[in-house]
Image: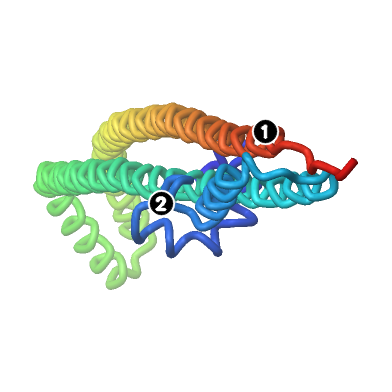
Amino acid sequence: MKIRTVVVALILAVSFSAFATASNAAPIPGIKNTPQFRNLLNYVDTLQAKRDTPASPDRKASYRSRLSQKRAGANSAVKSLFKRRSVRIASRDDKQERAQIKRIRRSQKQQVQTLRRAEDNRLDDAADDYRSAVSRIDARYAPKLVPLANKRDALQRKLARTTNPSKRKALNRKLDAVQNKIDRVVRARQDDTDIATDRYKDRVSNIKDSYASQIADVKAKSKRQVTKAHQAWRRTFRDDLNQIKQRRSQEFELVSNLRDRGAGYIDHMPPVAFAG
């Protein structure tokens, strides 16, 4: 399948092997169900419990540093979840797209095979008709050729037995006359055979052109269906990707809001009182 976007291409190249098994298993959790988010939440709860406890600037700086680290961990979890969801929808869409295109091409192959079988049958019928036509031509001219051939053979035998020059000359004239008749009949037969051959070639050409056109139409239709399938699945992927991007933004916002709560608790901590 074609890579849908550059971003997802990079995600697939880097992450597919790591997440392929998981993407086909249990549902991908939301950010609230990750250890990183729970660590951040627990730490914010801890800060909430200490919000009225005096803290020195250094202690507050330490709290902010740990809060920042836990926020970074939760943000990394958001990114990881987005990658897993991207891989899942890409894998799902690619699998379903491949299956749909496979069905389209299988249907095309079956239609083409059916047309080729029909073409072969038509060509076989044409060849049978041609052979029958040639046989009829031969049968039509045989009554003319056979007597002439027999007469020629008889004259040749007689010529072989004759030694008289004048008689041999007369026999040769008769042989030439008979042979001319044979040649005329053979030419006529060949003319009829050529006509039958030309008709056969035209018929074969028309059959092949007709089925080539039908096969081309089937392939063109299949190609259009494949193109539409690609476009439809790209739209589906784009819509799904936009949804998980929105979810990623919402999860980043959850993390930020939680971090802001924690920062507010730190800011609320009173300063440490020093003895006068």
Q: Quadrant of residue 224?
A: top left
Could one spot residue 3 in this view of the protein?
A: yes
Mark 2 lies on a secondary structure that is: loop
Residue 268 disc label: 1
In the rendered structure, the answer to whether residue 247 lies left or right of residue 221 reads right
Mark 1 lies on a secondary structure that is: helix
Q: Is residue 70 above or below residue 244?
A: below
Q: Nearer the viewer, mark 1 or mark 2?
A: 1
For disc 1, the neighbor class at 10 Å (few under 14, some 14 to 19, many from 20) is: some
Gap in angstroms between the C-alphas marked 1 and 2:
37 Å
Give the mark nearest the N terminus, 1 or 2.
Answer: 2
Tell me, yes or no, whether the two marked residues, 1 and 2, touch with CB atoms within 8 Å: no
Tell me which amino acid carries mark 2: Ile
In the rendered structure, the answer to whether residue 135 lies left or right of residue 257 reads left
Q: Quadrant of residue 155?
A: bottom left
For the rendered model, the colour scheme is: rainbow
Q: Position of residue 24 (x, y in %)?
A: 37, 59
Tell me which amino acid carries mark 1: His
Q: Residue at x 43, y 44 (%)?
A: 89
Q: Residue at x 17, y 47 (%)?
A: 121
Please name the residue that numbered disc 2 is placed on: 28
Q: Position of residue 254 (x, y in %)?
A: 53, 35
